[in-house]
Amino acid sequence: MIRFGPGNLRIPKFEKPVYVVAGGLTDFRKKYPEKNSCELCMEAMRMAVEENDLKVEPEEFRRMVNWVVYSQFADHFGDQLLAAAKIHDYLGFDPLGNIEVKTGGATGGSAVLAAAQAVASGYADCVPVVGWERMDEVSTRVGNSYIASAACKDFESELGWMYAAYYALMAQRYQHENNVPRESLAKIACKNHEYARYSPFSQNPGHYTIQDILANDIVSDPLSFLECCVMSVGAAVLILCDEKVAHQLSDQPMRLSAICGGSHTLRTADRRHMPILLLPNETEETYRHYFEGRRHEWPGFSSFLASRMAAYLAYHMAGIQDPLADFDLLETHDAFTISDIQTYEDIGLRPYGRGREFIESGDAYYEGRLPTNLSGGLIGTMHAVGATGIFQLVEVLWQLQGKYDRFHGDPRMWARYGKTKPADWRSLQVKNPKRACAISHAGTGSHVTCAILERP
């Protein structure tokens, strides 16, 4: 049994406030042969610098940068070691220092965490975070095997060379413990594919019914293709600054009030029972009868300790008392519909065993209590892994700045990517949002970051 010491639960703090001033994206596609990774990162950087109302010209901005963080999940895909060095040069940042971060699916969130640490410590005061993934130079089958290499190759990878198999087992276990109808999972897929229809950046939009999701071909029982994230190509950029530089660059800087990380064993079979780590909106009474049913241990195979740890630290760091009340929008790492319901519980939107209530109540929808994955998420829009956690925060930033319509509703943005804005397009701009949360998640929960962005 794991028991924490006081040092393990020390709440992080920033020595200096950290701000986010701008973000940029490419569109996301299954294949992108006409642009290499350097060009995609440049396109996202141009959007961040030239289309976010920054108060300086691009060359002046370049001269303000003093550290860069890069985010790429796997060298395998692009068959290029030190790819960040090529992109750093292409973006014009040589000879400035840089690092490249790799923590599986949470690589984007971890890269933002590394940039925030640089700014908060005073090491740097203007730090672009640049993420990308090149997943189109191998077949889907080979790509799945590369991604599965992020599971333990000594013991578990041999059991199934794709992550859908892991999450299918989780879904079966979770349904056994909590009697969750398949329809509850399907609602998540319907919602996120639908919201992707309103984004020019999206790879996999679609209008589906619950029956469409349930009748779709199975990848790994019970998960269908439409309940799984997409393999993508694309890039994302987020610019972090200290307070002085943030106001030099932008009239709408948003404060990164917290970003924290958690981890758990790579081998899921090694996850030991422990007392539930309680969030600020929970008490021991919350779970007094929890283990009297079909569930007898926590976190087990159906909860993510890394998510709970990241949320615990971030909530205390940012003063969050009740995430459902304190956040105005949320981006989760919806790699699979089952992982979304698990995350609802891990970050305290509902107590453990009751995650289905968040989607079934309507809370997760636009104009609900906590609109979730208005970007379309990983299921509807993208999972270019190194870019994913950055993409989430770019979407959150634009919502807080009131710029959703500018980047999603302008017909010229759709035309830029060879698309036509749908005749039934609708704005998903949240009204007067003040605080948002984004969860970046790796593997079967080996690494997770929880970021909280708010109006200062």
Image (cartoon, grey):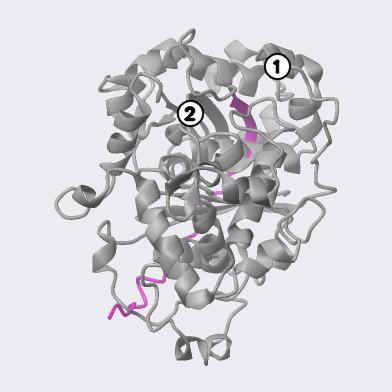
Image height of 170 relative to 393, above or below:
below
Observer able to see residue 66: yes
Residue in the picture at 44% in, 79% down: 276
Which quadrant of the structure image shows residue 207? top right
* Magenta region includes residue 121: no
CA separation, marks 2 and 1?
Answer: 17 Å
Observer able to see residue 397: no
**240 relative to 411 in the view: left or right:** left
Q: How many marks?
A: 2
**What segment carries the magenta color?**
1-25
Residue in the picture at 40% in, 48% down: 164
Image height of 361 relative to 407, above or below:
below
Q: Foreground residue, 280 or 160?
A: 160
Residue in the picture at 73% in, 58% down: 370
- The residue identified by callout 1 is 419
Residue 244 percent location from the top left of the image:
63, 37
Which quadrant of the structure image shows residue 266? bottom left
Residue 103 percent location from the top left of the image:
35, 44
Determine the residue located farthest toward the front in the rendered image: 215
Image height of 93 relative to 379, above or below:
above
Please, what is the three-letter code of the amino acid marked with disc 1? Answer: Lys
Q: Foreground residue, 8 or 149?
A: 149
| Most common SS among magenta residues | loop
Which quadrant of the structure image shows residue 427? top right
Residue 86 percent location from the top left of the image:
35, 15
Mark 1, residues whose alpha carbon is within 10 Å: few (<14), some, or many (≥20)?
A: few
Please, what is the three-letter code of the amino acid marked with disc 2? Answer: Ser
Q: Foreground residue, 412 or 180?
A: 180
Determine whether the residue tagged by mark 2 lies in a helix, strand or loop.
loop
* Magenta region includes residue 18: yes
Marking on residue 232: 2
Residue 316 percent location from the top left of the image:
55, 68
